[in-house]
Amino acid sequence: MRDVVFQPLSETESLVISADNSGGVGEKEHDLVHVPYETVAYFGLRVALMELLAVGAEPVSVVIQNFNDEAVWERLEAGVQKVFHEAGIGSVPVTGSTESNFRLLQSATGFICIGKVNTKNIRIGVTPEHAKLAVIGKPLVGEEVLTDQEHVAPLSLFYKLLHTKGVYEIVPVGSKGIEHELKGLALANRREVDLPAKGTLDLKKSAGPSTCFIMSYSPEIETELKKICRHYFYAV
């Protein structure tokens, strides 16, 4: 139901692993989307980190799989550190590997985020029946992520909402779209979700590097949340 793996470490603590990757995105001639490698790393790790934080875990390490060139490693790591800075999280150790034997025609990069969580703090299936739902940000993919950045939900906002009293669960939206994640959230909470027949957002569209996320929250804080989220807030 969620894009993470839990590996028990003890009776009270689990290791949590999340991942994301991109292909054909970077600075090579044959790439489909041309962006600096700092940007590739920023959006790639952003997804993996959001998945990790959303279930209640704290990151302890990052792994970069670099199939581009050894010369771009520092730029990839700079993009990674930008993510942690925006989220207000201290520096996290980074390791990884670079394909240096063969040169690919297109860019390819992978990111793994490893964290830990206290079992009692896992934020899955904790949305009560009376909760309301909203989407924060718009689903964007490809070039849209660069040309419509004003509708990409900021990582700083994501982190703030995670620590806002009355917010129950947050689910990053990926390539399968809002509708898929809404159904997963409903299943995890053994409840029904009424999908709007027509609205401002395309519920089936890919959200690329998690440019939006779903939030379940107490109706009592809706006014406060709308002020915090501003134009990113879309009621479901």
Image (spheres, helix red, strand yellow):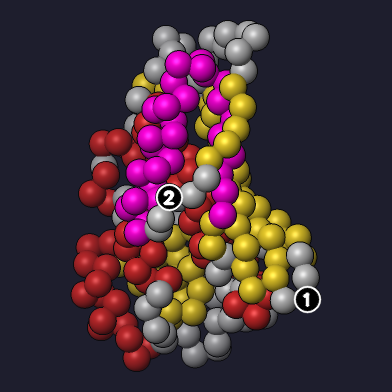
Residue contact between numbered discs 2 and 1, judged by CB atoms under 8 Å: no
Q: Quadrant of residue 58?
A: bottom right
Q: Quadrant of residue 159?
A: bottom left
- Total numbered badges shown on the rendered structure: 2
Residue 185 drawn above or below residue 110? below
Left or right of 230 on screen, residue 51? right
Residue 102 drawn above or below residue 191? above
Q: Nearer the viewer, residue 109 or 177?
A: 109
Quadrant location of the C terminus in the rendered image? bottom left
Image spot of residue 172 (x, y percent): 49, 58
**How packed is label 1: few (under 14 Cα within 10 Å), some, or many (20 or more)?**
few
Image spot of residue 3 (x, y percent): 63, 55
Q: Which residue is mark 2?
A: 91
**How packed is label 2: few (under 14 Cα within 10 Å), some, or many (20 or more)?**
some
- Res. 11 mark: 1
Check if residue 64 falls in the magenta segment: yes
Q: Amino acid at mark 1?
A: Glu
SS state under label 2: loop
Q: Residue at x 70, y 71 (%)?
A: 13
